[in-house]
Amino acid sequence: MSFFEQVNGKTVDEYVSDVANGKTPAIAVSRRDFNADQYKALCEAIRNSKAVNNVFLSDISDEAEIKMLFDAIASNGNIEKITLQNTPLGDKYVKEFADMYVKHPLLTGIFFKNANIGDEGAVALAHAVSQKTKAAEAEGVNGEAKLLKSIRLNQNHIKNDGAKALAEVLKDGKKLQVFIVAGNEIEDEGMFAVADALAVNDTVEKLDVSGNPFSPSGAAALVAVVRNKPSIKEYAGFEI
């Protein structure tokens, strides 16, 4: 019996039909609840739905199926947030996502947890965000809806180079409210860059750097900034 039969009282096929017919704006499912044909149908429903704006999927293991999902999201300009968990994107597919993200009109929330992302992927994603930010700012008021609001890259393999690139996202994020890099491999060098970027950002409300191997020196750099940032309402990974 599938997740949906147990929780929503529907079969997987009925759920996919609801997505296709615009009855489900927020999708939150595991790939394990679908057979291959049902997953393909779900991606097609995401592609064509005028209602879906939030996509949460976990446990996609097949590379072709990752690409299938990205193609669907690229074709649906209404999607604002994507969450992928326990899905081995690796640097290869984060780069593909980055290329798609630059062209997407409304995608402003990115959450990749336990996705096997390293520095190369983090740098590619940061560059894509920078490119899109510059283009959006050039549009003035009309471009504000395209600016990134949330980036969460929990439990990956991002080190200092990736953190420094992502710090530029934090530095330039005029609408960025959430910045999470918890559970990575970021040391003091990366945290110093994050702290420097945070010092000039007045929009971030939630910051989480917990589970990274930085020393008390890295923590002190963050504390010195956050102490004077009333805009930050939640933080984790250090104490003030």
Image (spheres, rainbow, N blue to C red):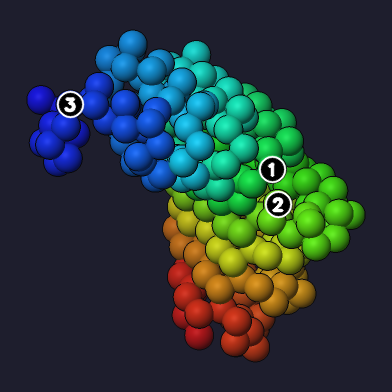
Does dot 2 land on a helix, a strand or a loop? Answer: helix
Check disc 3 and give the amino acid type.
Thr
Check disc 1 and give the amino acid type.
Pro
Q: Residues within 10 Å of mark 3 (few under 14, many from 20)?
A: some
**Marks 2 & 1, CB-CB < 8 Å contact:** yes
Does dot 3 land on a helix, a strand or a loop? Answer: loop
Give percent across and percent down for residue 200: 76, 74
Q: Quadrant of residue 220?
A: bottom right
Q: In this picture, is 209 found above or below 232?
A: above
Check disc 2 and give the amino acid type.
Lys
**Viewer-nearest residue: 185 or 8:** 8
**Viewer-nearest residue: 38 or 196:** 38
Label 1 sits on residue: 105
Give percent across and percent down for residue 30: 30, 32
Q: Quadrant of residue 35?
A: top left
Label 3 sits on residue: 11
**Residue drawn 61% across the image and 59% down it:** 149
Q: Residues within 10 Å of mark 1 (few under 14, many from 20)?
A: some
Q: In this picture, is 109 found above or below 188?
A: above
Spatial CA span between label 2 and label 3: 36 Å
Q: Residues within 10 Å of mark 2 (few under 14, many from 20)?
A: many
Is 29 positioned to the left or the right of 95 in the image? left
